[in-house]
Structures are given as structure tokens and as C-alpha cells.
Amino acid sequence: MSTPCRRRLMRDFKRLQKDPPSGISGAPCNDNIMIWNAVIFGPADTPFEDGTFKLLLNFDETYPNKPPTVKFASKMFHPNVYASGELCLDILQNRWSPTYDVAAILTSIQSLLHDPNPNSPANAEAANLYRENRKEYCRRVLDIVHESWEPEPTPEPTPNRTN
């Protein structure tokens, strides 16, 4: 079924494939164009540099008039990211515009890694460390960067039981 939302998501995907912004990638799941997996590489010259962070974007039929829900699937320590992985980012809330596409969303999130807003914290501990103890903040971020390099755990096979 083709809807305005689904047609727009296909355009977003084609644009992202044709001209991907540096350090980001994203694609819909094979069986559902309304759910996307994305990866953001930590921006250079930040504590997030060399990190590989996975995100999940969920769209509904109101897109592009309403933003998708976006959350980090990777562990994140950042003033504007909740423990759940959800973001406190103005373009995903009160400053959304239908002109934003998936590339713009991911680029904005990458920019947020570079320039956090500790005055609008989703994670008070990260915001306080960012303001008051930058060295400890950077150490904590480096821990999650190193975790981002770890391969995903492989589920243990379920043993066959025969009676």
C-alpha cells in the first residue's frame, strides 16, 4: 500500500543512498519501511570520535508532518539522551518541520554529539559532568565509545530436547 508517508520515506531512502552525509547511514528494515536502523559515527575532535552508535527510527503515517520517534540502540552517555536512549532534541519535538528528512535528522543527532545542550538535560549526571568536570565526562563517554566497538552478543542456541 502506497501512502504519502511511505512515498516520502522511499524518497528519503533514495536521497540518503545517493548522497549520504559524512558519518551517518540509515535504511529501512527489510520487511517494514516504517522502521529504520541507522548508524552515526562519533564526530571527529569530540569525546565520541571513533564511536559507532546505532539508532532506531520509528515512523507512523503522520510523517513528514510529525517527526519519527528516535532512540539510541547503543548505550549512550550524553546530556541530551535519556537512559532509555530517547533524545531531547528540539527538531524531534517543538521545532519539527516537514522539510526535515531522515538525513537531516541523523545529521542533527550527530551535531548534538558534537555540541550538547547541558541546559536542557535528559541525563542530569552527564549534564553536570559536562559543565563541572569535563575530564570525567570525557572518560565516561570514552567508555561507551569502547563499548560501541564490541560485537553484538550472539544468542546461545537452544539445545534440542528429545525424550
Image (cartoon, rainbow, N blue to C red):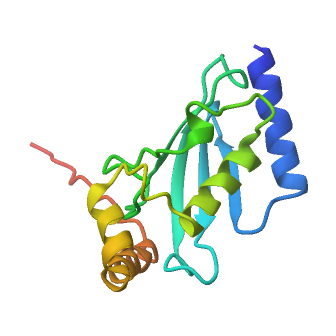
Nearest the viewer among 162 and 129 is 129
x 58%, y 72%: residue: 42
Q: Can you give x and y, in whole percent of width and height, for residue 54 in the image?
A: 52, 58
Q: Quadrant of the N terminus?
A: top right
On screen, residue 90 above or below 68:
below
On screen, residue 103 above or below 98:
below
Q: Quadrant of the C terminus?
A: top left
In the picture, measured across the screen, residue 141 lies left or right of residue 161, that is right
Q: Can you give x and y, in whole percent of width and height, for residue 133 in the image?
A: 31, 79
Nearest the viewer among 137 and 31 is 137
x 64%, y 34%: residue: 95
The answer to which image quadrant residue 147 occupies is bottom left
In the picture, measured across the screen, residue 150 lies left or right of residue 19, that is left
Q: Can you give x and y, in whole percent of width and height, for residue 76 in the image?
A: 39, 62
Give the residue at the far left of this rendering.
163
Q: Can you give x and y, in whole percent of width and height, for residue 2 in the image?
A: 80, 16
Give the residue at the far right of this rendering.
18
x 14%, y 45%: residue: 162
Residue 98: tell me if it is visible. Answer: yes
The answer to which image quadrant residue 114 occupies is bottom right
The answer to which image quadrant residue 94 occupies is top right
Residue 154: tell me if it is visible. Answer: no
Nearest the viewer among 117 and 98 is 117
On screen, residue 160 above or below 90:
below
Q: How many marks?
A: 0
Nearest the viewer among 8 and 104 is 104
